[in-house]
Image: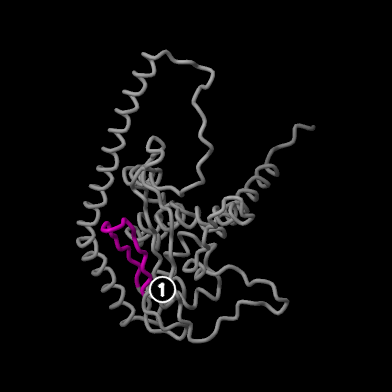
């Protein structure tokens, strides 16, 4: 089984890549410059270029309308997906009630979502987080397209000893319209903001170590994203910008890949993402094999 070829869905992967390319983080606009300033156009050429740009604006209007239709269609199918996901949750809940405690910790079906998350992006989950995420019973996406386009990622938890919330939510907001001042720069929908939620911990979290250094990152930092400064000259702007870029990609990844494909993340049949520990193991194995090959090469010395 270890050498089994992972399942890959080329068509779905291509669709995801196409959509992901159109959902991007807003970056500060570059100073406007005349394209090809060395070129001088005649009056007739300028008129022609103006007409061509007007046609381009019409294609942008079509792209905006198409994107809106895609969101409407996706929203219409959400209810059908939710019926399936509710059946999945029921199967997992029934298994846990009947078999909880009889399987290997952190690897068994009772800890289904913990393993799914660890298989998709392990670096965000600390050992402390794992105990909490054992109480995670479902992850869902909720889509909205009126009055604004956005989507929620909902993490549903069983009653637990850590916090009183039954659902932790992260919301991603999309801008689907061209900039009125620069419509020609439109290049598709943009995730421009994300908002987390307040976690009502039953005990105050100890976020400091004894030496007053910040504790290692936690999965639950996901629900407290930083706020991007309005001033692009702010010394923290670039760092926060990079953090949010990664955050937006993760939110979209959860929505498009992890939630619908959860079972094959759980079984390890998807080659979408490898954990850092797996990568290290593969690297070590490769080095060992290379060393072995070197030892097996016969010497030409007589």
- The quadrant in which the N terminus is found is bottom left
Q: Residue 213's image quarter?
A: bottom right
Q: Is residue 96 depicted above or below 285 in this figure?
A: below
Q: Position of residue 268 (x, y in %)?
A: 42, 58
- The quadrant in which the C terminus is found is top right
Residue 61 lies in the magenta stretch: no
Q: Position of residue 258 (x, y in %)?
A: 38, 59
Q: Position of residue 219 (x, y in %)?
A: 51, 68
Q: Residue 91's image quarter?
A: bottom left
Q: Nearer the viewer, residue 116 or 37?
A: 37
Q: Which residues are magenta?
A: 138-156
Kindly give the residue lying farthest to the front in the view shown.
Answer: 43
Q: In the drawing, does residue 213 fall left or right of residue 35?
A: right
Q: Is residue 277 depicted above or below 71 in this figure?
A: below
Residue 140 lies in the magenta stretch: yes
What's the residue at 37%, 42% (across, down)? 180
Are there few (<14), some (14-19), or many (20+) residues within 10 Å of tag 1? Answer: many
Q: Nearer the viewer, residue 123 or 143?
A: 143
The residue that mark 1 highlights is 111
Q: Position of residue 209 (x, y in %)?
A: 67, 77
What's the residue at 41%, 73% (across, down)? 111
Assign a secondary structure to mark 1: helix
Q: Is residue 295 depicted above or below 266 in this figure?
A: above
- Main SS category, magenta section: strand
What's the residue at 34%, 79% (across, down)? 96
Q: Nearer the viewer, residue 23 or 254?
A: 23
């Amino acid at each position: 089984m270890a050498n089994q070829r992972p399942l890959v869905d080329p068509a779905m992967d291509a669709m995801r890549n196409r959509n992901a390319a159109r959902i991007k983080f807003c970056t500060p606009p570059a100073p406007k410059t005349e394209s090809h300033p060395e070129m001088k156009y005649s009056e007739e050429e300028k008129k022609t270029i103006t007409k061509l740009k007007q046609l381009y604006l019409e294609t942008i209007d079509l792209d905006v309308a198409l994107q809106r239709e895609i969101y409407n269609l996706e929203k219409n199918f959400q209810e059908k997906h939710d019926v399936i996901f509710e059946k999945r949750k029921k199967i997992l809940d029934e298994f846990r009630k009947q078999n909880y405690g009889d399987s290997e910790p952190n690897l068994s079906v009772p800890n289904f979502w913990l393993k799914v998350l660890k298989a998709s992006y392990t670096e965000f989950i600390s050992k402390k987080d794992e105990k909490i995420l054992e109480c995670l019973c479902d992850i869902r996406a909720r889509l909205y397209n009126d009055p604004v386009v956005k989507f929620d990622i909902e993490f549903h938890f069983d009653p637990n000893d850590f916090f009183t919330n039954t659902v932790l939510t992260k919301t991603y907001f999309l801008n689907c319209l061209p900039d009125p001042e620069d419509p020609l720069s439109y290049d598709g929908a943009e995730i421009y903001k994300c908002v987390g939620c307040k976690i009502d911990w039953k005990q105050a979290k100890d976020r400091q170590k004894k030496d007053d250094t910040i504790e290692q990152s936690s999965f639950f930092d996901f629900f407290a994203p930083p706020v991007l400064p309005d001033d692009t000259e702010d010394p923290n702007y670039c760092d926060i910008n990079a953090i949010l870029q990664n955050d937006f990609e993760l939110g979209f990844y959860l929505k498009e890949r992890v939630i619908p494909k959860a079972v094959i993340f759980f079984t390890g049949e998807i080659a979408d993402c490898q954990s850092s520990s797996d990568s290290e193991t593969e690297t070590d194995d490769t080095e060992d094999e290379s060393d072995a090959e070197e030892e097996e090469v016969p010497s030409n010395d007589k």
